[in-house]
Image (spheres, grey):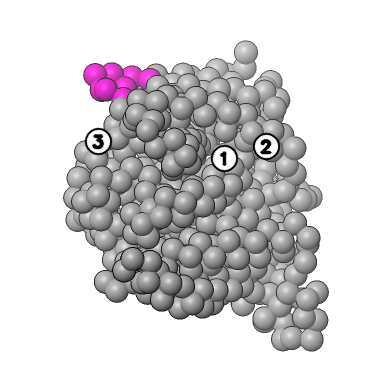
């Protein structure tokens, strides 16, 4: 066993230990398993939400996009920072309503606001469909990290299977508690490793950041600007807006809101968290440093930029530490996504059709669903060849379709009906699905429109259609709903 592999396995065992031990002395009912009895302090809520943000995509996908796309990769840092600004006003309202109505999942919120359990079923299904690609991102990233950092001693497929099994075990045993404790170690490791790599590698190979960017400009100047077509200014702006609106629509992030003791937690975090986002700059620096030192990476292989440069630079023991930190960036968000997906299916789908089911049966079903969802994710992970960034963006295009119904529901006088909300979500989802699966683009549909319109993110277009349909259907059904309420 090489030294790097030994260190990676030590991190894996530590994560398993923390995850399993977190359940000690706690009765794992539905509320405790999913939202920790709403008793997490500000630091735990911060780390849980950071755990969802700083994932294997941040570790590998961010550097991979900087390597392969250049300037367009900056959308990641911008949308996350703006999302924290939005959270200052959005999350306290969600937390307060959830606490007053004893909610434990994202779907519960929509069910309560629109008085429609079947809307909750739709929201749950949308959430699960969107979360599968993100679990794939975590497992694929984990496989890349462990395979590369172990110098090929463990294959990508083996690493994916081992990671999926570990995720399944500690999610089933500890629920959100395991994710929170592992997030503490993960964030300390990630900040240290990424900060070091982002400073050391550019200085080691180029002497300074200025010299690094000067060398890239001389060789590949297209990486240092937004292109005129494709990932252009209009793509950049529409993608940032789309992702800001969708940031807190993810079920695992949404339900993390419920774990806080107080709504003040979110305003404090909104002030501090943008500083934490600066760590992504160091991820991009690593990707840029690899452009000229690890040339020739194409397609999905651009995600190897960080590890490839690190392997040719450092001794095996340090590669093991990098691999261990990367492993944790997959386990924390992966566990929360598995937890959220299984909870949605059991509480907001199964219980709707079997309303007499006690909470004990719902919890048991949720835990049983965890390995099934993990298996589906493993299948797509081992048969998916696109980059981590592309997979992540596809999930965002889906989840953002929930935003209009959510934001309308927070109004004191919400004119949107349950029919309008459902119609908007369905049409938005159908638009994203059709464009994605058919390979159709705005340019092929409307070849004569300006280039800036052609480059708009497809999710942004779907969101616009979603809002129009939501408003029209709501106005059409509002009188019908009033008439039914008077009968």
State the CA–CA distance, disc 1 to disc 2: 8 Å
What quarter of the picture does the N terminus occupy? top right
* Residue at image coords 73%, 42%: 384
Residue at the extreme front of the image, as rendered: 487
Mark 1 crowd level (few <14, some 14–19, many ≥20, 10 Å Cα): many
Q: Which residue is under mark 3?
A: 37
Q: Residue 365: give its label.
A: none
Side of 156 where 407 appears, left or right: left
Q: Residue 135: give its label.
A: 1
Majority secondary structure in the magenta region? loop
State the CA–CA distance, disc 3 to disc 2: 33 Å
Q: Which residues are magenta?
A: 19-28
Q: Which residue is under mark 2?
A: 381
State the SS at label 1: helix
**20 falls in the magenta region:** yes
* Residue at image coords 33%, 42%: 104
Side of 236 where 180 appears, left or right: left
State the residue in front, 235 or 482: 482
> Does label 3 or label 1 sit earlier along the sequence?
3
């Amino acid at each position: 066993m090489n030294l790097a592999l030994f260190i990676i396995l030590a991190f894996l065992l530590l994560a398993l230990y923390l995850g399993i031990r977190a359940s000690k002395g706690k009765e794992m009912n539905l509320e405790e398993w999913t939202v920790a009895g709403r008793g997490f302090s500000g630091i735990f809520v911060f780390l849980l939400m950071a755990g969802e943000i700083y994932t294997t995509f941040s570790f590998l996908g961010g550097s991979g996009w900087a390597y392969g796309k250049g300037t367009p990769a900056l959308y990641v840092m911008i949308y996350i920072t703006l999302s924290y600004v939005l959270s200052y006003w959005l999350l306290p309202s969600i937390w307060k309503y959830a606490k007053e109505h004893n909610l434990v999942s994202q779907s519960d919120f929509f069910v309560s606001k629109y008085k429609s359990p079947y809307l909750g079923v739709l929201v749950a299904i949308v959430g699960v469909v969107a979360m599968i690609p993100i679990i794939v991102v975590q497992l694929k990233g984990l496989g890349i990290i462990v395979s590369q950092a172990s110098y090929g001693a463990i294959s990508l497929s083996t690493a994916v299977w081992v990671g999926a099994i570990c995720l399944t075990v500690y999610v089933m045993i500890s629920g959100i508690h395991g994710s929170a404790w592992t997030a503490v170690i993960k964030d300390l490791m990630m900040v240290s490793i990424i900060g070091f790599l982002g400073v050391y590698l550019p200085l080691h190979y180029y002497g300074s950041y200025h010299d690094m960017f000067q060398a890239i400009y001389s060789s590949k100047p297209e990486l240092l600007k937004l292109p005129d077509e494709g990932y252009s200014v209009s793509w950049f702006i529409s993608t940032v807006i789309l992702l800001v609106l969708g940031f807190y629509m993810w079920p695992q992030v949404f339900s993390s809101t419920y774990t806080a003791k107080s709504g003040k937690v979110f305003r404090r975090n909104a002030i501090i968290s943008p500083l934490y986002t600066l760590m992504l700059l160091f991820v991009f620096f690593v990707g840029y440093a690899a452009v000229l030192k690890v040339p020739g990476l194409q397609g999905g292989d651009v995600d190897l930029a960080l590890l490839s440069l690190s392997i040719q630079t450092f001794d095996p023991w340090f590669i093991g530490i990098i691999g261990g930190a990367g492993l944790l960036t997959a386990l924390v968000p992966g566990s929360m996504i598995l937890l959220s997906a299984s909870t949605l299916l059991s509480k907001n789908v199964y219980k709707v059709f079997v309303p007499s089911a006690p909470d004990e049966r719902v919890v048991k079903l949720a835990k049983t669903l965890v390995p099934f969802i993990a298996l589906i994710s493993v299948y797509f992970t081992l048969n998916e060849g696109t980059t981590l960034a592309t997979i992540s963006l596809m999930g965002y295009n889906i989840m953002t379709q929930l935003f209009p119904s959510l934001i309308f529901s927070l109004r004191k006088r919400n004119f949107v009906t349950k029919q309008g909300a459902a119609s908007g979500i369905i049409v938005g989802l159908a638009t994203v699905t059709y464009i994605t699966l058919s390979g159709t683009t705005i340019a092929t549909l409307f070849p004569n429109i300006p280039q800036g319109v052609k480059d708009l993110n497809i999710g942004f277009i779907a969101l616009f259609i979603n809002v129009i349909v939501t408003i029209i259907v709501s106005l059409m059904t509002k009188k019908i709903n009033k008439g039914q309420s008077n009968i």
